[in-house]
């Protein structure tokens, strides 16, 4: 990907209403972003595809929507209060703060500042531990505060509801509990757009299994999730790779972990992690809450604490990967055409309809009628706010696969022009067959 790809993608997202800076009119907040009208649509489509694939279409996974604010003891049990921390160091010259594990090491105790190239000597500028959890005062009075924590992963809401789900749903393991929701981390590394945010969204499944079958399910999930990105989300296979964690890299609770990495504009980075978390979480929540979270496995006639396989995906990173993968530039008649070659199902609009001349009421009426016919079946847009060339370019940039134009001839031959986003080829089709034509192309 070209070096300035990140700048171009951020700029496209901004000018076309995909992503805005958070609290922008007040100068913004670092690593906080808002999704605009088209971004909200694309993000929802990604989440819907995931939910549909795993919750609606499978009998072995149920959904959950647990709260964001959780009891302090949840994070004592999970280890987050104690261990969910980064080691940070300040550059003595530019005063910027960095995660030490992300700095280039020169030699023992010496690191290079990525901002101003100064050598940071950690014997003089000691690294300090910084907890990533965000807490909030839940007391009515300031002088007697008591704190709740904003979850740093949706997973903990699943573990704390494990027995509620088992008791009410009458299911047997292997059973997955799936959840989509916000998570919060006080991240310090900035400047990577929506890759690393303080408030972000996750799509997580905790898949509970008999410990004897955990290795096999772990491998199945790695494969399943890789395939999902290619087949359902439309990412190019060569922009994805698997990276298995070495033993020294594993989180304290994990038995194994594989990252699915995407080749983002700044290089290969984690899109999703799939971990075999063993029975760490249920065991610890059992210990701290003093509730029995074990399970009687009918199949093997034994009482077990299930192991859990966790495919943990980021909605925002998937969104970023989708836009990066789809971003194309090409030269057309001496000008650069920017086009988002999104998988048709992901495009915010499947089709845009324009009258060639907005001062001809008959054209406007026909175009609007076509729009009304389509809009309940496909996300569609009617637009007459500019010249046709400008309207096409706008739709190219937001990835609309098809544009339909009603012109003067349409009134007599009852045909309209369909333009293909990727090839820019145009063809005339019957005005009465627009819906059938779109159905065929979008669902292909
Ligand atoms: P990283 O090493 O990049 O900080 P992580 O290993 O801490 O990520 P996990 O705890 O495994 O991330 O979280 C699961 C998924 O949640 C990640 O693969 C990513 O898609 C998403 N995610 C985690 N942290 C963030 C963040 N700060 N902003 C956006 N998405 C995130």
Image (tube, rainbow, N blue to C red):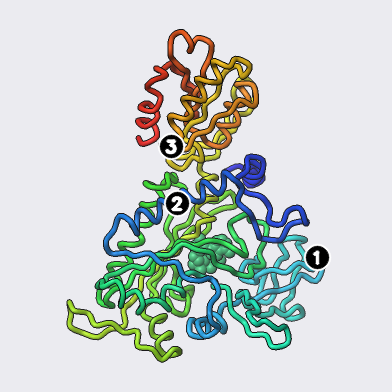
The alpha-carbon separation of the residues under discs 2 and 1 comes to 36 Å
Q: Which residue is mark 2?
A: 240
Q: Nearer the N terminus, badge 2 or badge 1?
A: 1
Q: Quadrant of residue 139?
A: bottom right
| Disc 1 secondary structure class | loop
* Image position of 142 with respect to 379: above or below: below
Q: Residue at x 63, y 40 (%)?
A: 16
Q: Nearer the N terminus, badge 3 or badge 1?
A: 1
The alpha-carbon separation of the residues under discs 2 and 3 comes to 35 Å
Q: Residue at x 60, y 21 (%)?
A: 388
Q: Residue at x 43, y 86 (%)?
A: 284
Q: Which mark is residue 94?
A: 1
Along the viewing direction, whichever of 271 and 242 lies nearer the viewer: 271
Q: Look at the numbered disc 3 and say if its residue's Cβ is closer than 8 Å to ligand 1.
A: no
The alpha-carbon separation of the residues under discs 3 and 1 comes to 55 Å
* Image position of 30 with respect to 326: above or below: below
Q: Position of residue 303 (x, y in %)?
A: 24, 86
Q: Position of residue 290 (x, y in %)?
A: 41, 91
- Observer able to see residue 86: no
- Observer able to see residue 72: yes
Q: Nearer the N terminus, badge 2 or badge 3?
A: 2
Q: Which mark is residue 348?
A: none
Q: Which residue is mark 3?
A: 376
Q: Position of residue 295 (x, y in %)?
A: 28, 82
Which of pointers 3 and 1 indicates the residue nearer the eye?
3
| Disc 3 secondary structure class | loop
Which of pointers 2 and 3 indicates the residue nearer the eye?
3
Q: Quadrant of the N terminus?
A: top right
Callouts 2 and 3 close, C-beta under 8 Å: no
Q: Residues within 10 Å of mark 1 (few under 14, many from 20)?
A: few
Q: Is residue 265 left or right of residue 143?
A: left
Q: Is residue 302 left or right of residue 9?
A: left
């Amino acid at each position: 990907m070209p070096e300035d790809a990140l700048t171009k993608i951020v700029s496209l997202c901004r000018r076309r209403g995909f992503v805005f800076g958070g609290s922008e009119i007040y100068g913004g907040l670092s690593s906080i972003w808002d999704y605009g009208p088209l971004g909200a649509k694309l993000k929802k489509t990604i989440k819907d595809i995931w939910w549909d694939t795993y919750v609606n279409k499978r009998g072995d996974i149920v959904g959950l929507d647990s709260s964001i604010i959780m009891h302090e003891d949840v994070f004592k049990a999970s280890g987050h209060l104690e261990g969910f921390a980064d080691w940070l160091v300040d550059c003595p010259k530019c005063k910027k703060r960095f995660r030490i594990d992300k700095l280039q090491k020169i030699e023992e105790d010496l690191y290079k500042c990525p901002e101003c190239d100064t050598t940071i000597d950690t014997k003089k500028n000691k690294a300090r531990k910084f907890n990533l959890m965000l807490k909030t005062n839940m007391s009515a009075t300031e002088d007697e505060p008591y704190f709740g924590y904003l979850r740093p992963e949706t997973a903990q809401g699943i573990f704390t509801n494990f027995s509620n789900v088992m008791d009410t749903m009458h299911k047997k393991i292997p059973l997955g509990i799936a959840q989509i929701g916000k998570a919060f981390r006080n991240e310090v590394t900035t400047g990577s757009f929506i890759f690393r945010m303080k408030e972000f969204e996750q799509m997580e499944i905790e898949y509970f299994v008999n410990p004897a079958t955990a290795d096999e399910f772990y491998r199945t999930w790695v494969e399943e999730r890789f395939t999902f990105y290619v087949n359902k989300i439309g990412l190019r296979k060569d922009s994805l790779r698997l990276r298995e964690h070495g033993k020294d890299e594993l989180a304290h609770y994990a038995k194994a972990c594989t990252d699915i990495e995407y080749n983002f504009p700044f290089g290969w980075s984690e899109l999703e992690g799939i971990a075999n978390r063993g029975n760490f979480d249920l065991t610890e929540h059992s210990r701290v809450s003093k509730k029995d979270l074990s399970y009687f496995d009918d199949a093997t006639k034994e009482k077990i604490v299930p192991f859990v396989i966790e495919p943990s995906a980021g909605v925002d990173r998937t969104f970023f990967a989708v836009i990066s993968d789809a971003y194309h530039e090409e030269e057309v008649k001496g000008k650069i055409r920017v086009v988002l070659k999104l998988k048709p199902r992901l495009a915010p609009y499947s089709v845009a309809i324009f009258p060639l001349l907005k001062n001809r009421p008959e054209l406007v009426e026909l175009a609007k009628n076509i729009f009304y016919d389509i809009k309940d079946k496909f996300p569609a847009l009617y637009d007459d706010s500019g010249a046709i060339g400008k309207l096409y370019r706008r739709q190219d940039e937001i990835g609309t696969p098809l544009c339909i134009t009603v012109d003067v001839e349409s009134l007599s031959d009852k045909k309209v022009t369909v333009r293909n986003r990727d090839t820019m080829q145009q063809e005339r089709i019957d005005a009465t067959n627009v819906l059938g034509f779109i159905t065929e192309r979008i669902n292909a």
